[in-house]
Each structure stands twice: as structure tokens, then as C-alpha cells.
Amino acid sequence: MSVPERRPMPSRPATPATPAPPAAQPPAAHSPAASTPPQRGRSRLGERWAAAKERAADQQPGRTQQRDERRTRAVPSWLDARSWIGAIVLMCVFTAILWAVELINLTEDHGLDRFGIRPRAVAGLWGIATQPFLHRSAAHMGSETVPVILIGWVVMVAGLRTWAVVTAVVVLLGGLITWLIGPSGALLVGASGMVFGWMGYLLARAIFSRRIKWILVAAAVLFFYGTLLAGLLPSLHSNVSWQANLGGFVGGAVAGAALHPRGRDSRLSPRRAVL
């Protein structure tokens, strides 16, 4: 019995493996730095770094004072309100403005006096702001020239901003009080209310701040001009409006109490104490 011969099956050629497709890459996130040109990015970074350094330097003790000193040195000494000479120069300029208005008023036969305060009259409310610039005569303006310069000078030494704030409070609040309590039918003009307002501020500053320097200043003002306080008392036979003087004095006292409240340590914050 014959056995069939087994022949080996022909081997098939090996099929090369197909490479797997590359994995999909996620889209790259948008980066502002990548889209920004290198030079522009560096410039922005430099600006931010410089601003951060400036803020850090401003927080250093004494930096603010040094900056203020540089600004002060930029102003001539004869125009610096915090110097004795600069304060007197500025007050002379202010007084010259008052005289200029008076000279114009003279050419108008004092027709500008109609813009004075008319108590409790709606038309007289405009006089609250214009009263200190108007006077009945050149002699009236002359009698108030020296007190305006000297007492205003003492206030001005504290700083131009302090003087401006105090003067605004005195003129507006004092003028409103005058409009409320003044005699009916009267026409009130003159800068005496402003002068009394400055005196009220100097006294209130000394009382509320309790600083030796300002107490001595208030005492000196009282020594030379203390007799003016008699103008605060009612007078029936006088051309002086005690109501305007009283209103200005109250306005100055309010300004002093607001700018120098009791209990504030002005030694730690001298600029805040004098605005």
C-alpha cells in the first residue's frame, strides 16, 4: 500500500506592513507673545518694568518730600507762596487787582456797586462773590489796603492753596451769612468781611491745631489788629456793616476748624494739616 507523498505548500511572499498614519497633533494654542514682534514685546515689558520701579520708589520714605522740594525749587523764591517774600508779593498782586477794580468803578461813577450784597433779595445773591472787590470810594479802598496785605500775607505763608481755600470759604459762607442777617434795603460792599474771615481762620487754626508756631502767629495778629474785633459788635450809628464782619469771621473760623481738626497729629502729616 503506497503512502501519498506530501509536498510542502509554496510559501507566499511576506506582505510589508503598512505604516500607521501619524497621530493628529492638537492645534497650537494662540500665544500673544508669539504673535507680537520681539522688539515690540520687549518695549512693552520695559515700560511695565519701569512703571513698577517708579511705583516702588514712590513708596520709599522721603521720596514724596524730595519730589515736592524739586517742584518748589522750580518756582522762583519771590513767587513761592511759602516764603515770606513770595507771600507778600502775591498779596500785593491781589491788592493791585482790588485797586484796578476800584479805578474802573471810579470811571463808572461807582456804578459797579450795584453788584454788592442786597440782604434777603434774590437779585442781591450775586453780591456774595463780588462784594470783596467793590468799595464805595477810593478812601474806603485805601483804609482796607494795609489790613488786606498784612493779614492776607500771614495766611498766604501757609501756602497758596490754603489761602485760596480759606478765602473761598470766607467769601461764600461769610457772604451768605451777611445776605441772611444784613439790614433790609442796604447795599453792602467792601473787603472788610474777608479781612475778618482771615483773622477768624488764624485764631481757629491756633485753637484747633495747638501748635506753638501758629499760636504765636495768632497772638501777634491780635496784638497789632485786635482792635478790629470791635467791628464784630452791633453798631447803630456807623457806616461799617458789622453783619459782614461777623459773617466773614464765622466763615474763617469754620475753615480753620475744617482744615485743622483737633486730634490730628500734624507732625506726622504736615502737608495735610495745611493743605
Image (cartoon, rainbow, N blue to C red):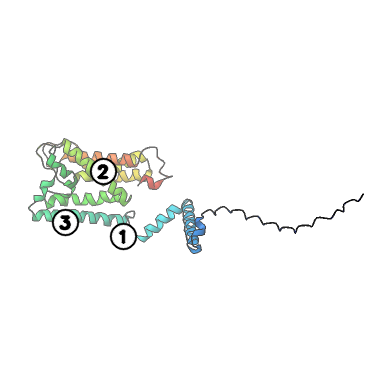
Find residue 246 and report its image quarter: top left
Q: Nearer the viewer, mark 2 or mark 3?
A: 2
| Amino acid type indicated by mark 3 | Ala
**Which element type, helix, strand or loop, lies under badge 1?**
helix
Q: Give the class, few, some or many, for how many residues have Cα within 10 Å of label 2's Cα (few <14, many ≥20).
A: many
Find residue 214 and report its image quarter: top left
| Residue topped by disc 3 | 100
| Amino acid type indicated by mark 2 | Val
Q: Give the class, few, some or many, for how many residues have Cα within 10 Å of label 3's Cα (few <14, many ≥20).
A: few
| Residue topped by disc 2 | 169
| Amino acid type indicated by mark 1 | Trp
User: Which of the two discs, 3 and 1, labels the residue nearer the N terminus?
Assistant: 1
Q: How far apart are the alpha carbons under marks 3 and 1?
A: 22 Å
Residue 142 at x, y percent in the picture: 16, 52
- Left or right of residue 161, residue 13 in this image: right
Q: Choose between 219 and 67: the one closer to the eye.
A: 67
Please report contact status of discs 3 and 1: CB closer than 8 Å, yes or no.
Answer: no
Residue 262 at x, y percent in the picture: 37, 37
Q: How far apart are the alpha carbons under marks 2 and 1?
A: 27 Å
| Residue topped by disc 1 | 78
